[in-house]
Image (tube, grey):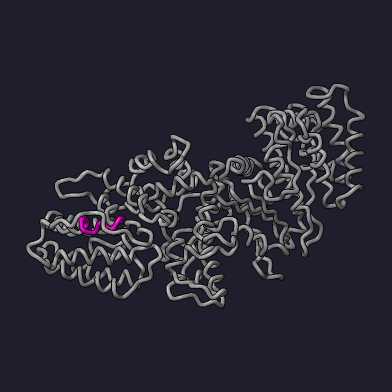
Amino acid sequence: MSGEAPRLRTRRLPVPNGTPLLIACSGGRLSGRTALLEALDARYAAYLPRALADLGRADFGRPELALAADDENPARRNASHASDLLFHLRHELSRRAKEFGKGIAFPRLTQGLLAVTGWQSPGAGELDAAARRLESLLRESLPAGRERQDRVTRWTREAEAGRGAAPGPGAGANELVARLVDVVGPDLLGPLAHNHGLRWWAARPLTGQDDAHVRLTELARLFRGDPDDREVAEGHLMAALLADIDAHYTLTRRLNRLPRPLLLLDNAHTPLGGPVLRTLARVWHEEPDGRRPGVVTTLLAEESPAADPESVAPSTRRAAGPFWRPGPPATAAGWILRLPLSRLDLGEVNRMFGTEHPPPGTARVIHRLSAGRAGIAHALVQAGRLALLQGDNADPRFLLDLPAHDAPGTAVHERLLRVLVPDSLNLDRLAHFSPALDDEAADLLGENYPPGDPGTLGVQEVKRLLERNHWGGGGGGAGQGFDGPFVKDPTLRALLGHHLAVRLGREADMRTWRHLHGTLRARYAPDATGLPDQALHHALAVLDTGAVVRTLHQRLAQRSAADWLASVNLVCTAPHPPRPLPSAAGPNEPCPACEGGNDPVHRAVDLLVRNLWVQSHPLAVPAREPIDAVRLQLLTLAQHTGAADQAVFFRAHETWPDLLRDRWYQAPHLPIRGDSRP
C-alpha cells in the first residue's frame, strides 16, 4: 500500500496507479487484532510516517491527549471523537521519521481544527481543554513548558482583542473563528502555507460566499449543530487531512517513490470508531482522486469455529488483492476490503515456546483449545513457559490452572475470562449458564442461578453480550438436530465450563453441580425411545452412566447407525465433573435391551461412551488405551447389527481411531456417515 518493502532499507516498490482501498481486518476477541497493528507500527517505524490510534478509547490509547470535559453539553462541545482523532493524526504524521526529510504539513486541517476549537462553549473545563488542544499544535516545534503556554496565551489574547463583546454563539463567535485562524495560522504554519490552506477552504462547498473565513465560520456552525450537521463538518475535516497528504507528495517526491503514510486504526467497530470509519469511507468516495495514505483498520467480527489449514479463502495470511482501484466503486462501502484475521497454525504455536520444551501434546492442546486465536494461545503458552521455568508441572491436563504469566496468583483461565468478560456479574452468569444446550435451558437455569443475582433479566443480558461480542460461531449442536448450545463458541464454552467446575469443585458433596445438571436433565421429557440426547448429555455429566448406556443400547434397534452415532457424539460432549468425582446418580436398573447377563453389546456401548467421553475432554491428549477401546467397541457393534448398519459402524471403526489419534478430533465432530470431515 505504501510502496515500502518490509525490513528492506533501500528497496522502494512502485506505487500502483489509482486509489488504495481501506483494509479492514476482522477477527474475534483475543484474535490478535491489536497485535497486528502494533506489529505493523513497529515494522515501519523507521521508514514511514504512520499513526496508530485505538478508536474504541476516547484518548485513542494516548492519555496525554487533550479531551473535553465529561460534564459538557455534547451539542455545544468544541470537539468530537473525530476531531480529537484528527488532532492526534496530525501530530503523529507531522513528526519526522528517521529516514525522511521534513514531516507532513497540515495547513488545511490545522485551519479547520482551529475553526471548530472555539471559545464560546460554557461547559465546565472546556476552555482549558480548548487551550490544551491549541497547545498540542506546538508539540512538533516547541518543547512542553512555559514557552509553549505563553505562545497559546498570546494567541488567545490577540484573538479575543478583535472579537465582539458578546460571548457565546452569534456574531462574536463568528468573529472569533476568523480572528483565531488569522492569528494562529501564519504564526504556526507560515504565511505561504497559511494562504494555500485558505484558498482550499474558499473552494469548499460550505456556503455560497467565496471566502475562506466565511466558510470556516460555517464549518464551526455545522460542527455545533445537530448530529447530521456535525457529521458533515467532520467530513470536511477528514477531507482536509487527505488534501494535506496529497499536497505533500509533490512531483519530486513521487519520482523518488517517497512512501506514503500509514494510518492504523484499531477497533473501528466500536460506538466511537464506527462513525469515524463511515465518515472516512464517505470522504474517500466523494473527494477527488489524489495521493492517499494506506489505511488498515480492525473490526470485531464473528469467526468460524476453527481454522482450516487447507482453506484458500482470503485472509490476512493470504490475500491476493487487488488493494487499489483505478476508479471509484458504486458506493462508499466499496472502498472497504474486509479480510478475516488469519488463525495461528500449529507450527506458530510451537515456536512461541522458544527454547522451552513442554510435555508432548501441549502445543496441540493449546492450538485446539484456542482455535488459533493469537491472544488466547499467547496467554496459555506463556503460562506453560512460566511453569517450565519454575520447575512446576506443565502437563496439558492442568494447563488452565497454571498461574498467568502477567497476573501472579491468578489462574490463566481466570485471567483470560476477565479479559473476555470483564464484568464479574456477567461472568458469573455465563459460567452458570454455559452447560445449557439451548436458550430455553438457560432460561430455566436463570430462575435459580447464579445465586444472589440481583437482576431478573440475566439470561437476556448475557445473550446480548454474546451477540455484541460475536461469540456465535461453531456451536456443538451442529448436525445434532438442535440449535445449541447456549454458549456456541467452543473456546469460550470450555473456559467457562472449567471456571464453573473449579468453583463448584470446592463443595464437598457437589450439590450445586448435581442440581444444575439435574435441572437441565429434567427439562427434556422421555419419549418412546427413552431420554432424549440432551438429557443423556446431562446424565453423563453427573456420572449416571447406567441411564446413558441403557438408553443408547435400547436405541440400537430403533435408530439407524448414523443417527445413533450422532447421539453418541452429542452425549460425549458432556462436561466432566470436578474432582473428586461424584458417585453415580441413577439407580442400577436392568437394561431392557440386554438378552442376558454380560451382554457384549451393552458392554460395548458402555466402554464406547466412557472412553470417547474421556478422549473428548478439552484438555485431553490422544491416548492409546481409550482410542483402542473406541476402535474395538465400534467393531463389536458392527458385528452385532444388521446389514444396513454394519457398513456405518465398520467405517467408524476404521476412521475414528485415526481421527482421534492423528488429527485430534473429538466429539461432537466425529463423522457419522463415513467421511473424514467434521
Q: Residue 71 lies in what quarter of the image? A: top right
Q: Position of residue 605 (x, y in %)?
A: 19, 63
State the residue in front, 439 or 582.
582
Q: Position of residue 471 (x, y in %)?
A: 45, 49
Residue occupying the point 92% across, 39% down: 154
Residue occupying the point 46% across, 40% down: 453
Q: Residue 102 lies in what quarter of the image? A: bottom right
State the residue in front, 516 or 329.
516
Q: Is residue 352 visible?
A: no
State the residue in front, 566 or 398.
398
In the displayed structure, does residue 246 sit left or right of residue 296? Answer: right
In the displayed structure, does residue 267 sit left or right of residue 598? Answer: right
Quarter of the figure with the C terminus = bottom left
**Residue sitting farthest toward the front:** 508
User: Residue 542 colored magenta?
Assistant: yes
Q: Position of residue 425 (x, y in %)?
A: 50, 44
Q: Position of residue 588 (x, y in %)?
A: 18, 57
User: Residue 151 colored magenta?
Assistant: no
Q: Is residue 509 visible?
A: yes
Dominant SS in magenta: helix
Position of 445 relative to 95 (above/below): above
In the displayed structure, does residue 343 sit left or right of residue 14? Answer: left
Residue occupying the point 61% across, 53% down: 296
Q: Give the magenta part as a residue range.
A: 541-548
Position of 288 relative to 356 (above/below): above
Residue occupying the point 87% across, 45% down: 188
Position of 672 relative to 427 (above/below): below
State the residue in front, 517 or 184.
517
Quarter of the figure with the N terminus = bottom right
